[in-house]
Amino acid sequence: MERIAIYPGSFDPVTNGHLDIIERGIQIFDKLIVVILKNPKKQFLFSPEERIEMLKTSLQDFPSVEVDTYDGLLVDYAAQRKAHAVLRGLRALSDFEYEFQMALMNRRLKREIQTVFLMTGMRWIYTSSSIIKEAAMFGGDVEGMVPPLVLARLREKFPILANPN
Ligand code: ADP
């Protein structure tokens, strides 16, 4: 049986922390589906199309990874794709409570889907999409924290980043 996992998130934009989880996830699963979930609570910097392009380009060397979007409940998507697992990354303590709640809620909604957590690589423990956007907005150099295409796209959004003093 093919072992399929879903890696859901906003990926606004994808960071090297996400890529680290994906690279380790594909060692456990035969197929990994990275899915951009529409989250009505959040405001995004990049459109879904821009986020897909950045993910696809950054993941082009990984044939067992697919990129998709979904508007709805994660467990419904997982069942539809015949996945048995949801993959999530854990950073510092601050992730724990939210991830714990979400994993328990998803288990209540569909018992047969397991949530699997991978601990972030030490290098990426403080890397998040939001802190990267915050730094980039004010011209902070985020090179080395995001894939090259993401850096280029951030420089387009925030001209101050493209012209460092
Ligand atoms: P969400 O909008 O659901 O918070 P994100 O796109 O921010 O989604 O992240 C998706 C998943 O990747 C989450 O499980 C998050 O904890 C994990 N993640 C994000 N950044 C890192 C990182 N630097 N190291 C490990 N996991 C991470």
Image (cartoon, grey):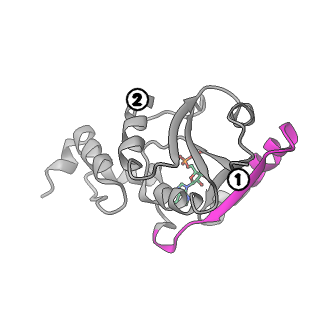
Density class for disc 1 (Cα within 10 Å; few <14, some 14-19, many ≥20) is some
Residues at discs 1 and 2 in contact (Cβ within 8 Å): no
Left-right relation of 10 to 149: right
Write the residue at 73% across / 49% down: 1
Density class for disc 2 (Cα within 10 Å; few <14, some 14-19, many ≥20) is few
Residue 18 spot, x, y in % from top left: 50, 55
Task: Identify the magenta region.
Answer: 100-123
Residue 158 spot, x, y in % from top left: 25, 42
Left-right relation of 52 to 75: left
The image quarter containing residue 116 is bottom right
Callout 1 secondary element: helix
Write the residue at 74% across / 31% down: 76
Q: Earlier in the sequence, mark 1 or mark 2?
A: 2
Q: Is residue 154 magenta?
A: no
Left-right relation of 16 to 92: left
Q: Residue furthest top?
A: 71
C-alpha distance separating marks 1 and 2: 26 Å
Q: Residue furthest bottom?
A: 122
Q: Along the line of sight, which residue is nearer the eye, 50 or 30?
A: 30
Write the residue at 66% across / 48% down: 5
**Vertical relation: 143 (above or below) 123:** above
Left-right relation of 145 to 122: left
Mark 2 CB within 8 Å of ligand 1: no
Residue 45 shows in the view:
no
Instruction: State the residue position of label 2.
Output: 49
Instruction: State the residue position of label 1.
Output: 99
Residue 106 spot, x, y in % from top left: 79, 42
Q: Along the line of sight, which residue is nearer the eye, 81 or 43?
A: 81
Mark 1 CB within 8 Å of ligand 1: yes
Under mark 1, the amino acid is Glu
Callout 2 secondary element: helix
